[in-house]
Amino acid sequence: MNHSELAAFLKSRRARIRPSDVGLPTGPRRRVPGLRREEVAQLAGLSADYYTELERGRGTQPSAQVLAALARALRLNGDERDHLFHLADRMVPPAAHGPAAHVQPGLLGLLDQLTTTPAQVITDLHETLVQNPLAVALVGRPPAARGPAASFVYRWFTDPDARTLYPAEDHPYHSRVFVADLQAVAARRGHDTEVTQMVAALRRRNQEFAGLWDTHDVALRRTDHKRIVHATLGVIELDCHSLFSEDGRQRLLWFSAPPGTEGAAQLQLLSVIGTQDMTPSANELGRPQA
């Protein structure tokens, strides 16, 4: 691993990005031309100390997932992304799909412009690639999982906690839609090992999935009306829109609500509270903490 070259490359890429390019305020007291180290770390989901060590030419070899996150945070193109991997002595860049995939520039550019509504880029298997702050506040960050568990569809049928995102009465609907969408993705991909293994695993583990898969209903999830359960704001009714990449492997999702509706008011409040935990603590409720 070439520590000094990696450090120099990270510094050069950080310096060229304007805060406004990634939805951050410029501010009158900014003394660096590009992003601050802590801002890159925040965008990549890393600790500021860890990223600082990389820019100082120290620290351990970053993993493929860390490099993929840095490539997204620094808005690297394909050649720059590959160069980053080579400098870190990771000779095989991530696949074109999966949670370490390189976000397609067109979708990433649009995501950067969506600063007033929750938005995120996912793969066709519903693996989250990148989120804006409002999407994190609305649906939370995905778990740091690899393999099938990186897919929200897979977790929907294998992890009960995944279903807390939607009201219980809406679960049968979402199950049907997820399976029909996966049928369409499987047909598009052909005999893709990643999809066939996921389907086989879900058929073994979940009777609901197996039954729905055998109906052979097929429909890509393009637009939808959702009720999302938020810990502080309660149930939020939103419209979910999808924009597909040219090859269909990635999707830009964004959430909106008609003006004047309760959902629109809740989105506005969400932009104020962000990811703060506004639920009362045990002390505030007069109960002893566990």
Image (cartoon, rainbow, N blue to C red):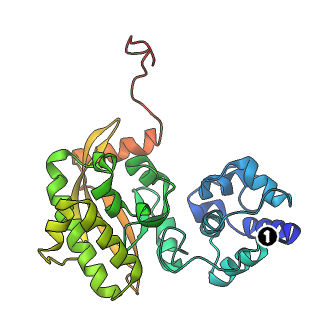
Residue count near mark 1 (Cα–Cα under 10 Å), binned few <14, some 14–19, many ≥20: few
Q: Nearer the viewer, residue 153 or 267?
A: 153
Residue found at the far left of this picture? 215
- The x and y percentages for residue 118 are 40, 56
> What amino acid does circle 1 point to?
Ser
Q: Is residue 182 above or below residue 38?
A: below
The reply to whether residue 249 is in sight is no
Q: Residue at x 39, y 28 (%)?
A: 279
**How many numbered dots are placed on residues in this image?**
1
- The x and y percentages for residue 226 are 23, 56
Q: Nearer the viewer, residue 192 or 12?
A: 192
- The x and y percentages for residue 99 are 50, 67
Circle 1: element type: helix
- The x and y percentages for residue 181 are 25, 73
Quarter residue 153 falls in: bottom left
Quarter residue 93 falls in: bottom right
Q: Is residue 152 left or right of residue 12?
A: left
Residue found at the far front of this picture? 204
- The residue pinned by badge 1 equals 12
Residue found at the far right of this picture? 4
Q: Is residue 49 above or below residue 120?
A: above
Quadrant of the image containing the C terminus: top left
Q: Residue at x 60, y 57 (%)?
A: 43
Q: Nearer the viewer, residue 23 or 52?
A: 52
Q: Residue at x 41, y 65 (%)?
A: 148
Quadrant of the image containing the N terminus: bottom right
The reply to whether residue 167 is in sight is yes
Q: Residue at x 33, y 46 (%)?
A: 161
Quarter residue 151 falls in: bottom left
Q: Is residue 196 left or right of residue 82?
A: left
